[in-house]
Image (cartoon, rainbow, N blue to C red):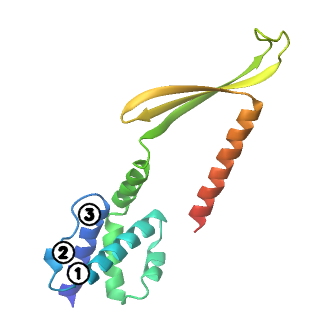
Amino acid sequence: IVYLLEKLKLYTIMVVDGVCGRSGPRRTDYGERWSLTEWVELMNTLSSFIRFAVGRGCSDQEIKELLSDLDTAHAEAVLQGVRSRFDEIRHALVDRTNGISSTQLQDFNWQLKLALSSDKLSALNTPLLNLSLDLKENGIQRTVNIEMNKEELQTLISALEAANKVILKLKAH
């Protein structure tokens, strides 16, 4: 049984390699043990479990509870495989998430102005916000400047608050 547990640890580490973007386990190495359907199900289930546990930042106890259907020795083997490379898996998941968009916000700056007049109106007295976004797209840094009036700023704030609510809701699940 010790031999089988060592094989499970090795298999888990190979699945972790796959989650981290390296070469994962090959079916040819385990073909005599599982059918193709069992192999695909095991790969998908274990990969999903690893991403879930690390993405949620689960404690050892929480991982053991999630693996309660397995016997203690198998659950411990999976736990050790995940724990040994937890930071590397988390980093791979962050990179995977960042890869969804090629543009990333690096920094921002804002400036509030009061437009007293324009070429069309002599008394304007309109507050304006200048928002400067430093973006990195495909390794190239660029700056985008946006000028907003009060209504446009309120629309942006509402959209950001709605996005924050969605993120908090996703984190709670």
Looking at the rendered structure, the secondary structure element under dot 2 is: helix
Q: Nearer the viewer, residue 21 or 74?
A: 21
Q: Are marks 2 and 3 in contact (CB under 8 Å)?
A: no
In this rendering, the answer to whether 84 lies above or below 118 is below
**Residue 68 image offset from top left, x and y in percent:** 44, 86
Q: Farthest residue in the front direction?
A: 120
| Residue annotated with mark 1 | 36
Q: Are marks 2 and 1 in contact (CB under 8 Å)?
A: yes
Quick one: label 3 or label 1, which is nearer the N terminus? 3
Disc 3 designates what residue? 17
For disc 1, the neighbor class at 10 Å (few under 14, some 14 to 19, many from 20) is few
**Image height of 107 relative to 125, above or below:** below
Distance between the alpha carbons at the discs numbered 2 and 3 = 15 Å
Q: Does 160 sit left or right of 79 as displayed? A: right
Mark 3, other Cα within 10 Å: few <14 / some 14–19 / many ≥20: some
Q: Amino acid at mark 3?
A: Asp
* Closer-to-camera residue (45/76): 45
Q: Of the numbered discs in the image, which one, if any, rests on residue 27? A: 2
**Marks 2 and 1, the one that precedes in the sequence:** 2
Q: Please tell me which residue is depicted at 14% across the width and 85% down the height of the picture.
A: 32
Q: Residue at x 48, y 33 (%)?
A: 135
Q: Which mark is residue 105?
A: none
